[in-house]
Amino acid sequence: MRLPTYFISHGGGPWPWLMDRMPGYQLLHDSLTAIGTAHPAPRAVLCISGHWECPEFTVQAHPNPPMVYDYGGFPEFTYHVQYPAPGSPDVAARVIELLGAAGIAARADSQRSFDHGTFAPFVVTYPNADVPILQLSLKHGYDAAAHLAAGRALAPLRDEGVLIVGSGFSFHNLRLFGPAGHEPSLAFDRWLTDAVTGPVAQRTDALLAWERAPAARVAHPAEDHLVPLMVAVGAAEAEPGTRVYYEPDFMGSIASSSYRFGAAE
């Protein structure tokens, strides 16, 4: 069975542990829950998080990754939450093998912890922490073509039971999370959705030119939360995209979307 790939908007900080205080997350929560039931549990999840970047592509090879609480300003207990999903050193080795075969330098990191771009969404998708998860870093520079190429190289994992998920945000300008961000987030979200769900033959070229999109640099002053999308698209480059989550006023103001590439089953 060939698994699809996803690009998800992963929310802010440790939000799944704060649902009683952050009711604006219900639609995002439901969309992440739906991913966990859309197809049989994968052998492993390869998560490309917007919160980890390295000089070259680096894959997490820790057999039982600990947690890194890479956020601030939240209640004290959220710096002690746990998501004890196992890692997958064997899949990590396969990732390095596939990237190397495509001429892409990569290395393993046996010490890397889960960041909240991974543990926050997946505690919702796989709440029993029974699916192995490993992270793949972004590469410094955020070159869209390089991340698309990495996705292409990793596409065989989809036939090997590995779910590839880019974890970022369709809008990521923290200074504009409020009324001032509403219109630019809508403008960029409309463009992004048209680009990724439109004709497959035009999608790659559109994404390579993303900086020319309406409000592009307002939506992403730095593209760390957009580039995970490129890996997900590259791994399913010939397959259609579908929006699987959308709300025009996430947390009261921001347009936010997530996408699937390829069929759910």
Image (spheres, rainbow, N blue to C red):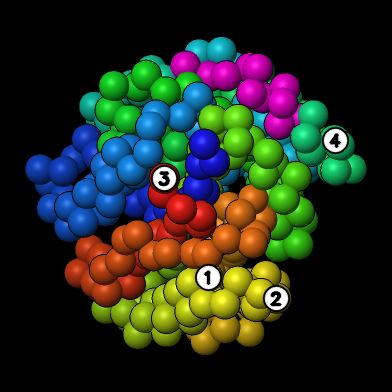
- Residue at image point 40% right, 55% down: 9
Q: Amino acid at mark 1?
A: Val
Between discs 4 and 3, the one toward the N terminus: 4
- Residue type at mark 2? Asp
Question: Which residue in the structure is indicated by mark 4?
Answer: 100
SS at badge 4: helix
Q: CA distance from mark 1 to mark 2?
A: 11 Å
Do tag 3 and tag 1 residues touch (Cβ < 8 Å)? no
Mark nearest the camera among 4 and 3 is: 3
Kind of element beneath mark 3: loop
Residue 5 seen in this snapshot: yes
Which quadrant of the structure image shows residue 84? top left
Q: Position of residue 8 (x, y in %)?
A: 42, 53
Among all residues in the image, which is located at the extreme right? 103
Residue 250, magenta (yes or no): no
Of 221 and 133, the residue lying toward us:
133
Tell me the residue that label 3 is attached to: 265
- Sequence order check: which comes first, mark 3 or mark 2? 2
Q: Nearer the viewer, residue 260 or 229?
A: 260
Depth order, front residue of 110/264: 264
Q: Is residue 93 left or right of residue 222?
A: right
- Point out the stretch of residues depicted in magenta: 86-96
Q: Which residue is mark 2?
A: 205
Neighbourhood count class around disc 3 (C-alpha, 10 Å): few under 14, some 14–19, many 20 upward: few
- Rendering coords of residue 113 (x, y %): 53, 25
Query: Residue 91 lies in magenta, yes or no?
Result: yes
Which label sits on residue 228? Answer: none
Amino acid type at circle 3 is Glu
Residue 97 sits above or below residue 30 on the image: above
Instruction: Give the labeled residue for mark 1.
Output: 196
